[in-house]
Image: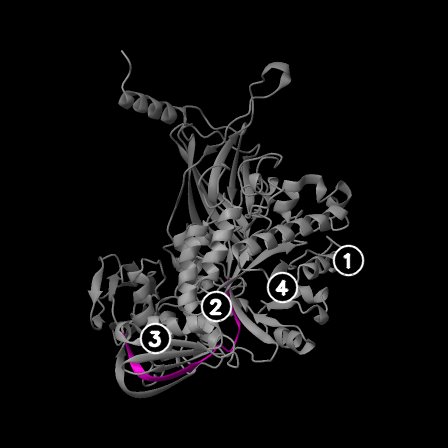
């Protein structure tokens, strides 16, 4: 009798499950304290043995990823941590390791240079590799398959985990209750203008007449006038007719976006509008962590809705190569995958969070096919968004080097000692090899072909040019390479673009567009005065991968500060004839899903949209906040986007608890000690003996981070100093 399909499926499933190696151990991580020594933090790992045999000091290595922290080994430690390459680490037992018996656990205290201050300070992607111990025929050793090791994380609950010590470089105050309350109140107290329209960006000029227009019933007339400002438009609205006069198709498109934002009914009058900057962009990094093209379409829709017109696409870096290049299949077959490897012949080393499996559907793995890239170009082009590809060179090229092998390097070049900003020691190609230029020529040529086939020819090409580590190249080698790259771009009629470091190798006569990314007003002004076209990309305003604030639940980096939805709006950008654009950056080191991509972008994107269109916006901070939280964030919710919401502030005043929030709607919940969450309506009397108050906002199906406030015996905010931290034990 033949087995049934159901029984076959069950047997197959049983076989697959049975063949999965059961994790012989698990890990629990807990933050100890920062600045146990100057610039040193302590972390605790608890290892539990789930196997039937003791875990000894032989035969195993744990691999994992850790960002920004560097291990310190002290004599007598039972575990040795090694920083293998950038964020890739290992743990091996030392001779002092005592056997860990079955069903038992042991906690190890480990020290790191740096600070563990939020969720992105946690280790990720643990996997175990057992040392081969059983020889096969001809002296070969059995290759052990890695085993994923589960790791749990203790939440931050103590003030010394959240607040910073006095030694660390972190100077921004921790976002506890009273700090956030003052910040929120500053926004709520900001003046507001009259007749602010529900539009972002706001039109340059709006003159009202009597009446309203039902858009669906009105006649639409469109004509173009080449003498108008590029991308600009004039719109005359009467009860029966809407007339759009624009400089070009982009101007017509933006006029229609204004109507779309207004909705079904619009006020009658005349709108005169045009952008101050013609490069209004967002850089998406799909290299460090990958998210598919189809998800990027959703970002393009939001960009177009708010008149952003450049997608700067970061496609290659040290950690991966994400774009298919005909004729060079190894770039994506090998360098778009990360996992356990001893020689990097089949995949790259694990970085960030991917684990050991190069074929797993994680953010570590994936690439954009030629066909999908062309589809993206067409989708963007239909929305008047230019796609500018970036192939970063000659640094940040570790993925290309590993994929191409000795064609981009040699043993003499690799003997040079250097370390990149991300702690790589081998990420610069050998620019003295003729093939290095041939390689770039081939890549540029194929990308130009894709843009031509899509129907949106490429006019600019980003060569990166940043963070080439000292000691990797001589100035003469570097200059000769860039000169040849510029010749390639010139042959294709492409204007070069790069980060501000390219001014060391590209003269103003090259017309190279420079992204000014460091936190300085002097550098972009100097570049503009020298004749370079400059795009403002200030890290402390426009790096959207930065955490929203200095709070332990926030995701994101903070090496250059913090960027929330107000930082991208609440400033006066430099104005100069050679400042041609503004660009926000979303690097993906901290990205773990597309939901987090949206969480980092929204609502920060609104400040970019307003300032890139209107350098000197007429909106006040109060106007802007109302538009963000009472108009456009609700629209994101309606369209099922993910987004971040500002947490509430908490203070005590005359023995009463006061909580504030930036949005009109939504609900505030608060918790006194561990009494459970309650709805906040009005100031609340504080019971005796309360030590901790927490608060959060629920709005449009989302929940903010939880704000903490520690209280002393007088119910005043407690100042947890370093001396007080010392009394707290693990």
Q: Can you say whether 497 is above or below 201 in the image?
A: above
Sort mark 3 into few (<14), some (14-19) or many (20+) by Cα contacts within 10 Å. Answer: few
**Labelled disc at residue 172:** 2
In the displayed structure, 617 sits above or below 383; it is: below
Q: Is residue 656 above or below residue 435?
A: below
Q: Position of residue 521 (x, y in %)?
A: 59, 76
Number of the label disc, if any, that sits on residue 497: 4
User: Where does label 3 land, which residue?
Assistant: 220
Q: Which numbered disc, 3 or 2, marks the residue that appears first in the sequence? A: 2
Circle 1: is it few (<14), some (14-19), or many (20+) Cα within 10 Å?
few
* Image coloring type: one colour
- Mark 4 secondary-structure assignment: strand
User: Main SS of the magenta segment?
Assistant: strand
Q: Is residue 458 left or right of residue 545?
A: right
Find residue 374 and report its horizontal and vertical position in percent: 51, 52
Q: Is residue 396 visible?
A: no
What whole-number distance in Å separates the C-alpha atoms at marks 1 and 3? Answer: 56 Å
Mark pair 4, 2: CA separation: 33 Å
Q: CA distance from mark 1 to mark 4?
A: 18 Å
Which of the two residues, 135 or 614, is positioned nearer the viewer here?
614
Q: Earlier in the sequence, mark 1 or mark 4?
A: 1
Find the residue positioned furthest to the top. Answer: 1
Bounds of the magenta segment: 265-282
Q: Residue at x 66, y 76 (%)?
A: 526
> Which residue is denoted by mark 1 in the rendering?
480
Q: Position of residue 366 (x, y in %)?
A: 50, 44
Earlier sequence position, callout 1 versus callout 3: 3
Q: Is residue 267 magenta?
A: yes
């Amino acid at each position: 009798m033949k087995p049934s399909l159901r029984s076959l499926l069950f047997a197959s499933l049983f076989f697959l499950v049975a063949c999965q190696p059961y994790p012989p151990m698990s890990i629990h991580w807990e933050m100890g304290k920062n600045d146990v020594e100057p610039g040193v933090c302590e972390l605790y790992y608890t290892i539990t043995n789930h196997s039937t045999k003791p875990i000894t000091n032989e035969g195993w290595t744990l691999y994992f990823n850790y960002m920004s922290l560097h291990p310190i080994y002290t004599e007598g430690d039972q575990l040795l941590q090694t920083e293998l390459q950038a964020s890739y680490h290992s743990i091996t037992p030392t001779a002092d390791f005592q056997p860990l018996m079955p069903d038992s656990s042991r906690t190890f205290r480990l020290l790191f240079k740096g600070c563990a201050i939020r969720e992105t300070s946690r280790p990720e992607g643990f996997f175990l590799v057992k040392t081969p111990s059983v020889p096969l025929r001809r002296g070969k050793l059995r290759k052990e398959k890695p085993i994923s090791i589960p790791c749990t994380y203790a939440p931050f609950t103590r003030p010394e985990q959240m607040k910073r010590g006095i030694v660390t470089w972190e100077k921004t105050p921790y976002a506890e209750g009273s700090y956030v309350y003052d910040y929120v109140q500053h926004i709520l107290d900001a003046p507001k203008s009259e007749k602010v329209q529900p539009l972002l960006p706001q039109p340059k000029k709006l003159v009202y007449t009597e009446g309203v227009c039902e858009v669906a019933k009105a006649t639409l007339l469109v004509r173009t006038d080449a003498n108008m400002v590029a991308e600009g438009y004039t719109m005359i609205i009467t009860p029966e007719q809407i007339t759009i006069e624009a400089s070009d198709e982009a101007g017509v498109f933006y006029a229609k976006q204004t109507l779309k934002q207004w909705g079904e009914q619009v006020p009658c009058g005349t709108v005169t509008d045009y952008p101050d900057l013609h490069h209004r962009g967002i850089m998406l990094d799909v290299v460090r962590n990958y998210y598919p093209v189809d998800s990027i379409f959703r970002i393009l829709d939001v960009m177009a809705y708010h008149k952003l017109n450049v997608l700067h696409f970061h496609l290659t870096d040290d950690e991966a190569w994400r774009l298919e290049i005909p004729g060079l299949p190894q770039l994506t077959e090998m360098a778009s995958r990360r996992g356990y490897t001893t020689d990097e012949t089949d995949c790259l080393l694990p970085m960030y969070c991917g684990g050991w499996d190069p074929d797993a559907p994680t953010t570590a793995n994936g690439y954009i096919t030629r066909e999908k890239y062309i589809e993206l170009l067409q989708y963007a082009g239909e929305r008047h968004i230019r796609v500018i590809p970036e192939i970063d060179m000659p640094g940040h090229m570790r993925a290309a080097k590993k994929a191409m092998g000795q064609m981009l390097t040699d043993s003499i070049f690799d003997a040079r000692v250097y370390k990149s900003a991300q702690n790589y020691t081998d990420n610069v190609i050998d620019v003295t090899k003729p093939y290095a230029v041939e390689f770039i020529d081939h890549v540029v040529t194929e990308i130009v072909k894709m843009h031509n086939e899509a129907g949106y020819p490429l006019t600019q090409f980003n060569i990166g040019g940043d963070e080439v580590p000292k000691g990797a190249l001589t100035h003469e080698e570097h200059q000769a390479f860039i000169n040849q790259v510029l010749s390639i771009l010139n042959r294709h009629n492409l204007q070069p673009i790069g980060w501000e470091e390219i001014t060391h190798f590209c003269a103003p006569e090259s017309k190279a567009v420079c992204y000014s990314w460091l936190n300085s007003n002097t550098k972009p002004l100097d570049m503009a005065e020298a004749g370079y076209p400059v795009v403002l990309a200030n890290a402390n305003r426009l790096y959207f991968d930065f955490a929203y604030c200095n709070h332990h639940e926030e995701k994101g980096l903070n090496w250059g500060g913090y960027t929330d939805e107000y930082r991208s709006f609440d400033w006066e950008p430099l104005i100069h004839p050679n400042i041609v654009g503004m660009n926000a950056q979303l690097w993906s080191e901290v990205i773990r899903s597309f939901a987090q991509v949206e969480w980092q972008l929204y609502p920060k994107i609104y400040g970019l949209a307003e300032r890139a269109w209107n350098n000197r916006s007429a909106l006040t901070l109060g106007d802007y906040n109302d538009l963000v939280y009472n108009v456009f964030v609700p629209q994101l919710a309606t369209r099922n986007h993910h987004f971040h919401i500002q947490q509430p502030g908490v203070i005590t005043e005359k023995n009463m608890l006061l909580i504030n929030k930036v949005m009109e709607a939504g609900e505030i919940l608060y918790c006194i000690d561990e009494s459970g969450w309650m709805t906040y309506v009005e100031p609340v009397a504080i019971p005796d003996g309360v030590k901790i108050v927490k608060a959060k906002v629920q709005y449009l199906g989302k929940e903010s981070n939880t704000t903490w406030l520690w209280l002393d015996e007088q119910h005043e905010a407690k100042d947890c100093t370093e001396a007080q931290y010392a009394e707290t034990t693990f």
